Image (cartoon, helix red, strand yellow):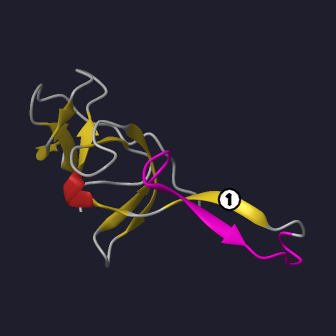
Amino acid sequence: MKIKKGDNVMVIAGRDRGKTGLVQTVLVGRGRAVVGGVALVKKHIKPSRRVPSGGIIDINLPVDVSNLAIVCPSCGKPSRVGYKIAEDKKIRICKKCEQSIEHSTTKNG
């Protein structure tokens, strides 16, 4: 999958077309990603110990990755992802400007 957690993406199809946000979670088996601020729905929560007041909250639903395009940090445009081998490492590149797409998040553990 070419989209990773922490990528800045733009929605290119669907009801939220044109919105951008950061990828919070990637569901590899389902081919979907949860993007902050995109595909928001209201969920009614019953009062419980975890949520004592209950009420209505906003949650982000997963979006199919085919409806997402990575926003290149160099040129600032939505683009497809390519790969290049550099110094014995496989790096992701922007197909429009051929610049590297660095992964901004760090892995813990």
**Which element carries disc 1, helix, strand or loop?**
strand
Amino acid type, mark 1: Ile
Quadrant containing the N terminus in the rendered view = bottom left
Quadrant containing the C terminus in the rendered view = bottom right
- Residue 34 locus on image (x, y percent): 44, 59
Q: Would you identify the image quadrant in which residue 82 lies? A: top left
- Residue 76 magenta-highlighted: no
Foreground pick, 59 / 72: 59
Q: Would you identify the image quadrant in which residue 63 lies? A: bottom left
Decide if residue 46 is on the left or right side of residue 77.
Answer: right
Q: Would you identify the image quadrant in which residue 79 lies? A: top left
| Above-or-below relation of 29 to 58 | below
- Residue 86 locus on image (x, y percent): 16, 41
- Residue 38 magenta-highlighted: yes
Q: How many marks?
A: 1
- Residue 15 locus on image (x, y percent): 31, 49
In this view, which residue lies farthest toward the top?
A: 75
Foreground pick, 18 / 79: 18
Decide if residue 107 is on the left or right side of residue 7.
Answer: right
Q: Residue at x 85, y 78 (%)?
A: 48
Foreground pick, 79 / 66: 66
Q: Residue at x 81, y 68 (%)?
A: 54
Decide if residue 95 is on the left or right side of residue 37.
Answer: left
Q: Which residues are magenta?
A: 35-51
Q: Residue at x 83, y 69 (%)?
A: 51
Decide if residue 36 is on the left or right side of residue 72.
Answer: right
Q: Which residue is mark 1?
A: 57
* Mark 1 crowdedness (10 Å alpha carbons): few <14, some 14-19, many ≥20: few
- Residue 92 locus on image (x, y percent): 21, 44
Q: Residue at x 38, y 44 (%)?
A: 7
